[in-house]
Amino acid sequence: MRTQSHRGALRVAMQRYTARPDSDLVPEAQAATAASSTVEALQRLIRQTQTSLLRLRTSLTTLPVKFFYSTVLDAFQPKDHMGLFSGDRVPLSPTEGDCSSVAVCIRSLLPLAQQSERHILDQSIFSLLTMYLSLLTKDPKLSELARAAYTSAVRAFRLFIGSRSQAELAHPQKSYCQLFLALSTTLQLFEYVNDLGETGTGFLTHHEGMLQLLQISGPEVYQSPYLLQSFSGLRGIIRRRPNFLSEPKWIYMPFFCRPKTRRELLHDIALEIPSLLHRADDLIPSLLKSPHGDPGRLDDLLQKLRVAQELVADFAKVKSDLEAWLHNFKQSCSPAPIYWSTDTVMDNPYSHSDPMCTPNLEDPKYQLRFRDGQKAGVLICYWSFILELLMSLLDVQIAVSTLAGSESATEVKDITKAMCEDLDANRAAADDNAFLILQSIPYLTCCLEGVFVTQSPLSLVQRYFARSHSSQAVTRGSTDD
């Protein structure tokens, strides 16, 4: 009964959030304009700035554009209690980090701006920061300026790459690698910000180029503080396909000179998930095609089941590591909770109020409260990692369960029973994590940073909810056998 009622609540919450138009995910303008007098000054300056100043080959060194760029950079500098990022407005421990990967990366790029020998980097940084501000203030003229600057930056970037010889590209110098990483970070983040946290074609093109250079150059190149921060932020935007970033040398060497933040420790574990998903995607079709009750194919079937056993054990190991991370997180904040459920407004003395981010409390029974936005941001990432892992694990277990028919060999039945004994528990855990993601969305989406953080988890929950009925039908069919 508990599972049915929980799924009913999940269905209601899912309908509630998917029924809202996409535009509702963008924060309200009044919260943004209250950030600081700097943003207000920017908006006044925008009215006097011609879009044509930033088109094509216009230099950022011309006086009007240089002044505008300096004002934009100043808007993103850390400011106690009134900065653009939530980390400026609430007290943080050194282990916390920023709320989103976007904030982490932007922070890393600011010290690299306005260096005369890197005009191409300034064009890229300007386009990114201006696009972010356009979303924050809902100003279409800023969006126009940002896209014009981005067009110029991409053109200059292509010329920059084309001017390098094949030998330079195959064995790039350290300074070249560092500049390329900063450029790639900026351009792919522009695409990410422009698409409100979606990883579209433009983002993926830049991301693939960055991965290729990282692999050529090696992890030791990115130990400088600012580039390490960029690298850290980009690690948080994880794709389903496995890559070399999960290798030990990439986990440890770039961070040799400083301790990792809590978010970085979470990403260390999460980088193992794409490999598990890839293995599951390869294995499941062969399990579903396996013939039932054919003695001549028994050895082949048992071999596939042993592969499945090993995969399920690896899923369990990563899941255990994620749960240990959450336990340590809670212990570090004890006795204060890091999140809680309540029907009232911000009622907990442990919560830190962010003057720019006030959640919409239209329906408090489906909402969570958090100590601050940083904890909310890292927790929704944790729940999405657990949910994606469980979704793939459930797919494997359901595929295995179809092999335990009445005509199956005893050994096959024993193995499938052992592998599927926690299937119901995993399904309930997946429901729980999906529900926690949905409950946290109102808290996070009252700020632009939170909008970026929630896009991937919300998309994952939609995918989970869409497939849940078909998975249950398959399981019921195998049980009827």
Image: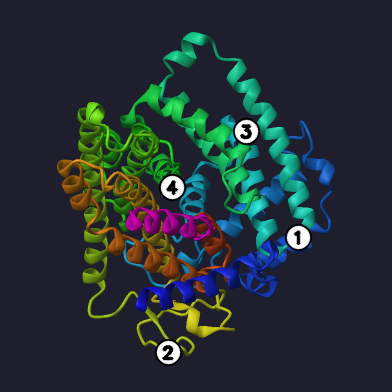
**Where does the magenta region start and end?**
461-481
Amino acid type, residue under disc 3 in the picture? His
Q: Are marks 2 and 3 in contact (CB under 8 Å)?
A: no
x and y, in percent, of residue 69 in the image: 67, 48
Which residue position is annotated with label 4?
Answer: 233
x and y, in percent, of residue 14 in the image: 54, 68
Query: Image point 62% across, 37% down: which residue?
Result: 201
Label 2 and label 3: CA atoms lie apart by: 49 Å
Left or right, 265 with respect to 50, comes to left
Query: Image point 36% across, 79% down: which residue?
Result: 1
Q: What label sits on residue 119 in the rendered view?
A: 3
**In front of the other: label 1 or label 3?**
1
Residue extending furthest front? Answer: 407
- The answer to which of marks 4 and 3 sits earlier in the sequence is 3
Asked whether residue 480 is drawn in magenta, I would say yes
Left or right, 198 with respect to 386, comes to right
Label 4 and label 3: CA atoms lie apart by: 23 Å
